[in-house]
Image (spheres, rainbow, N blue to C red):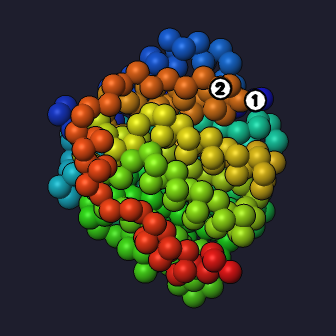
């Protein structure tokens, strides 16, 4: 199995002390991959920055000019309350987007069987004309638009298991029938979108599928959502390729959210998605890093994805489950009625 892997060491120039989305996240991931000897088995490539032509498939020229202008001011600038830009951030973000595009291209063109992209800043909250939620450029959407235009991919599945709703990705493909966007996310939580009634618009009606989960759900509920919603929706859509917005902030140790997935639970979801790709589209799948703010989780989580993509059975889950997790799970209602409601809304019972 050839798994293309892209990251870029220059990400350290996009950093802000005490911010949850800091360079230490990816430094830890790279160290964990090295310690597991995974770099030797991955097909490692360095990305080129996304070109202006690439970026304009999603973003407005005004927004790109603003990012470039901010980058030249020589100091940190905040976009809104939560998203920072350093003098090198625009370049780093273009490398991240370029990595996503390059990995998707390699897999679509048959140069690799599947792919893994570990980059920052993340992308799934970025809008065509606006940075938000720690995201500057819409990495996964840029890769998707590239596949549509350069590889003539007609049917693309994007699954977003980051704990936050991928509002940017949803917005970009809301009226596009060629992209099925499925998001599982905690609700209520930032950014506040992703209600189950948001199902797409116009020709894209039905190709946005939101699974808003109340705080606390963990491995068993997510596994049921994948078995009873994601699998049948993917089979009906018959994608030619799958992109995954892989954020690990639905883990119980994450400081920004309240779900209770374990590393083993994440691995189950990862392997389900790889299984979907094998059944439906010749194994063509690329995982792209989004959020995940526990430094205990980021390294083993990405290593587990790498093992799974390489076809290895290895799973690492070194973190002992705290007592509060089973206590929280015992208080939650059965996930069944929500699953039933979503299946009915999307015609998955037919
Ligand atoms: Zn997130």
Left or right of 24? Residue 290 is right
Above or below: residue 77 compared with residue 37? below
For marks 1 and 2 on the same chain, the one whose residue lies earlier in the sequence: 1
Residue 116, position as x, y percentages in the image: 60, 36
Q: In which quadrant is the C terminus drawn?
A: bottom right
Q: Quadrant of residue 20?
A: top left
Q: In which quadrant is the N terminus drawn?
A: top right
Q: What residue is rendered at 64% in x and 67% in y?
A: 233
Residue 244, position as x, y percentages in the image: 56, 50
Above or below: residue 133 compared with residue 43? below
Marks counted in the figure total: 2
- The answer to whether any part of residue 101 appears in the image is no
Above or below: residue 216 compared with residue 169? above
Left or right of 285? Residue 140 is left
Judge by depth and name the residue closer to the eye, 114 or 323.
Answer: 323
Judge by depth and name the residue closer to the eye, 349 or 171.
Answer: 349
Select label 1 or label 2 by which is in front: 2
Residue positioned most to the bottom:
202
Residue 99, position as x, y percentages in the image: 57, 40
Judge by depth and name the residue closer to the eye, 339 or 107.
Answer: 339
Above or below: residue 198 compared with residue 15? below
Q: What residue is rendered at 17% in x and 55% in y?
A: 81
Neighbor class of circle 1 (other Cα within 10 Å; few <14, some 14-19, many 20+) is some
Neighbor class of circle 2 (other Cα within 10 Å; few <14, some 14-19, many 20+) is few
Q: What residue is rendered at 42% in x and 50% in y?
A: 162
Residue 254, position as x, y percentages in the image: 29, 39
Q: What residue is rendered at 49% in x and 40% in y?
A: 266
- The answer to whether any part of residue 292 appears in the image is yes
Left or right of 65? Residue 116 is right
Judge by depth and name the residue closer to the eye, 251 or 324.
Answer: 324
Residue of label 1: 2
Q: Which mark is residue 313?
A: 2
């Amino acid at each position: 199995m050839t798994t293309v892997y892209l990251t870029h060491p220059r990400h350290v120039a996009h950093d802000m002390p005490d911010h949850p989305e800091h360079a230490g996240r990816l430094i830890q991931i790279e160290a964990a991959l090295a310690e597991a000897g995974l770099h030797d088995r991955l097909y490692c490539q360095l990305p080129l920055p996304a070109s202006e032509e690439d970026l304009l498939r999603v973003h407005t020229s005004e927004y790109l000019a603003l990012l470039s202008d901010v980058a030249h001011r020589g100091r940190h600038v905040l976009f809104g309350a939560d998203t920072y830009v350093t003098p090198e951030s625009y370049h780093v973000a273009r490398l991240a987007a370029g990595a996503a595009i390059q990995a998707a291209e390699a897999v679509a063109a048959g140069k690799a069987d599947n792919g893994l992209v570990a980059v920052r800043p993340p992308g799934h909250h970025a809008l065509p004309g606006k940075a938000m939620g720690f995201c500057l450029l819409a990495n996964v959407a840029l890769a998707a638009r590239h596949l549509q235009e350069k590889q003539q991919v007609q049917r693309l599945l994007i699954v977003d298991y980051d704990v936050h709703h991928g509002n940017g990705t949803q917005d970009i493909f809301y009226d596009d029938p060629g992209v099925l966007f499925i998001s599982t996310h905690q609700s209520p939580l930032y950014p506040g979108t992703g209600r189950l009634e948001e199902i797409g618009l116009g020709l894209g009606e039905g190709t946005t599928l939101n699974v808003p989960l109340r705080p606390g759900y963990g491995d068993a509920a997510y596994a049921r959502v994948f078995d009873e919603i994601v699998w049948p929706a993917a089979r009906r859509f018959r994608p030619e390729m799958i992109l995954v917005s892989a954020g690990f902030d639905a883990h119980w140790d994450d400081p920004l959210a309240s779900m209770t997935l374990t590393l083993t639970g994440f691995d189950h979801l990862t392997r389900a998605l790889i299984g979907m790709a094998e059944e439906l589209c010749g194994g063509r799948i690329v995982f792209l890093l989004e959020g995940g703010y526990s430094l205990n989780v980021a390294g083993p989580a990405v290593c587990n994805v790498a093992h799974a993509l390489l076809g290895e059975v290895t799973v690492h889950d070194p973190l002992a489950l705290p007592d509060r997790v089973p206590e929280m799970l015992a208080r939650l209602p059965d996930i069944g009625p929500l699953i039933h409601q979503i299946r009915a809304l999307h015609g998955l019972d037919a």
